[in-house]
Amino acid sequence: VPPRDLEGVRVVVSAGGTREPLDPVRYLGNRSSGKQGYALARIAAQRGAEVTMVAAHTVALPPPAGVHEVHVSTARQLGEAVRSAAAGADVVVMAAAVADFRPATTAEAKIKKSDDTPDPTITLDRNPDILAGLVRDRRPGQVVVGFAAETGDASGSVLDHARAKLRRKGCDLLVVNAVGEGRAFETEDNAGWLLRADGAERPIPLGSKSQLAIAVWDAVAELRAR
Ligand code: C5P
């Protein structure tokens, strides 16, 4: 049986991937399944938390038991829903894959191809960083958790990039997934690291998304107990 160590704790979890519309039938999206966010919401509720889950687009998933669900589509909608729920929350976990950019304009009618006009170009505007905003407006004692999907490259390892992101975003906890080659997105399993703002680092062994969720809530409960 799960521990009841989050009894009465008010939690917000974002899940899934946003869609940024180009016209009434097309969008820019991403491969997030929503499974990690749903697992986080479900396990927090099992541990006694009062959970609001703000979900963008996901594959078909069973609703997590005992969780209040808010469904959104775009990054800006997700931002508004998370911000308003966060105003009364003790913990906010940003597991959603939020689009960094949206089409600068959304056509009112379906964009058509034509032999007489040049092919269209998509201009992008930057979406606000929701996580950074949450950190900025954080209530006293509120714990803010971010996710980072990282690949290693010539300029540094997955962990180097993740440590820099933790500092840049200013959250209390960063859950790092190594991505690429079939890892993390569209899979059942996740592995990575938990990085804490105070410098504590812990590997998360390869396991199910539920196991990763358990590790995240363990770390949150530990932070709240300090
Ligand atoms: O910078 P990057 O997109 O890798 O950061 C990932 C983290 O930031 C995730 O927790 C994600 O939910 C959040 N994020 C956000 N708003 C954005 C982009 C990402 O809150 N516009």
Image (spheres, grey):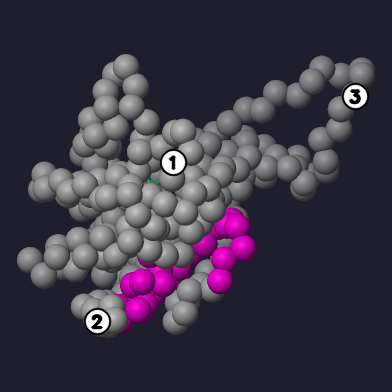
Q: Would you name the residue on which mark 2 appears?
A: 4
In the picture, the quarter occupied by the N terminus is: bottom left
| CA gap, disc 2 and disc 1 | 31 Å
- In the image as oriented, which residue stretches furthest toward the left? 226
The Cα atoms of the two marked residues, 2 and 3, are separated by: 61 Å
> Which residue is the site of mark 3?
114
User: Image quadrant of residue 122?
Assistant: top right
Is the residue 97 above or below the residue 61 in the image?
above
Residue that label 1 marks: 183
Which of 188/220 is in front? 188
Specify whether residue 75 is in view. no
Q: Which residue is rendered at x = 23% and y = 30% of the image?
A: 160
Name the residue type under label 2.
Arg
Could you give the CA–CA distance between mark 1 and mark 3, rounded to whole angstroms? 40 Å
> In the image, what residue occupies the spot 54% across and 73% down?
63
Tell which residue pokes out farthest to the right in this image: 115
Observer-nearest residue: 127 or 223?
223
